[in-house]
Amino acid sequence: MSGRDPFCQPRRLRRGAALTLVFAGALVTGAATGSFPDPAHSGRGALPQEAARATIRPDAVQKAAAEAMADGESPMEAAERAVSRSGDRWGAVYSRGEYQEFEEALDGQYTGVGLWARRAGDGRIEVTRVQSGSPAAAAGLRKGDRLRSVDGTEVDGRPVTEVVSLLRGDALDAPAGTAVRLGLERGPRTWHETLRRARLSTDSVTVRTLATGVTVIRIGAFTKGSGDVVRSAVRRAPAGAGIVLDLRGNSGGLVTEAVTAASAFLDGGLVATYDVDGEQRALHAEDGGDTTTALVALVDGGTMSAAELLTGALQDRGRAVVVGSRTFGKGAIQMPTRLPDGAVAELTVGHYRTPSGHTVDGRGITPDLVADRRALERAETVLSGLGDPS
């Protein structure tokens, strides 16, 4: 059996619902997915509420979709109605193209032009970063440029997530190589630039060393290979100064990668437990992690799912001091069901818990030290007090 835990959804939850991309302004380039060791089951986050166990089975959704197809109606719309009526807050239906994007994100890749952006206070869309080696970089775009339109659609006042959708297009209709025309502004200059989308890799883990010698490991999402990058960063960290594991804004990803990351700081043992249709299962860290270097985990309301799983493990096992604000609260597990037209429906089948048995879903994780502002400075202060026990 296999399953996934796509904690960060593609561009929407259901037809007609508000556009939801958890990466929002932080990562304009795509959405990460996640996977439990049993890839047939998954969890995904959308609202900070406790998820209800689905009251509709996958076969019922498939039946509704099949009947709709036989009647000449949309199987996807029929499935959306069935999931909506089920009362499953986390339930979702995705088109074939959206789910393909979701699958691609497992490898930490996306199809796009390489722009990060945010919506400024006046509603304008401003480029905040241009990925090196991307089509946007080759065209000379740079931080601070204003994005005025995408393929003729004005973007002022639109949510960043909607702008992302326009930039990326549908995975099936806008693969790598397809063109997208951007309207741009830089100071008094306005111009148009036609870029061709490309397959790009996300920088899900970044590592830097502060002036104090503290190593900051920021994980934007748990994409494929990110756990090993974390382990390598821990091994290379200077001795004595400590490590800050920055999980702020991390909307989740591959649970297996989160467990690998946990293994960098734990010498084996329990990371989390979870249930699938009432059957209890467990996730364990590998032996040999660094258990002595002082560690602070930074979290906020954007810390979700797999990131909460990792935070809960480090906190419950006394391995890290957690600094920041209460996390999102997403700990539901869902099972994907393929529909006749290639769309995918997902229903909640269980939840995961921290090593101490705490339920995350709908509750989140409370930090040991609340710090909404200047959280990194607070983390450095905590590290200086902890010292290096070695």
Image (spheres, grey):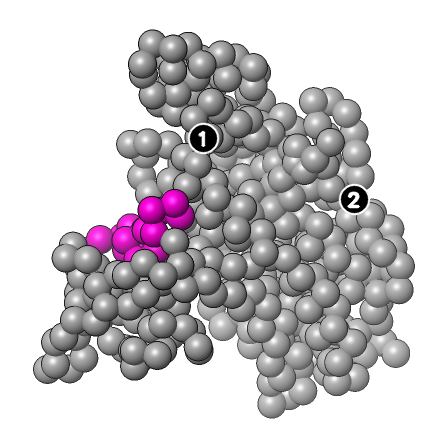
Mark 2: amino acid: Leu
Query: Image quarter for residue 220?
Result: bottom right
Res. 283 mark = 2
According to the picture, the residue beneath numbered tag 1 turns out to be: 343
Of the two numbered discs 2 and 1 in the rendering, the one whose residue sits closer to the viewer: 1
Mark 2 to mark 1 CA distance (whole Å): 30 Å
Question: At 40% across and 59% down in the image, what residue appears?
Answer: 176
Q: Residue type at mark 1? A: Ala
Q: Residue 224's x, y, as percent?
A: 63, 57
Q: Secondary structure at mark 2?
A: strand
> Residue at image x 78%, y 76%?
235
Q: Quadrant of the N terminus?
A: top right
- Which quadrant, please, contains the C terminus? bottom right
Which label was assigned to residue 128? none
Give the residue at x 79% y 64%: 265
Q: Residue at 67%, 61% (x, y): give it.
A: 225
Residue 352 position, x and y percent, is 68, 37
What is the magenta range? 158-174
Task: Give residue 189's position: percent from left, percent from top.
Answer: 12, 81
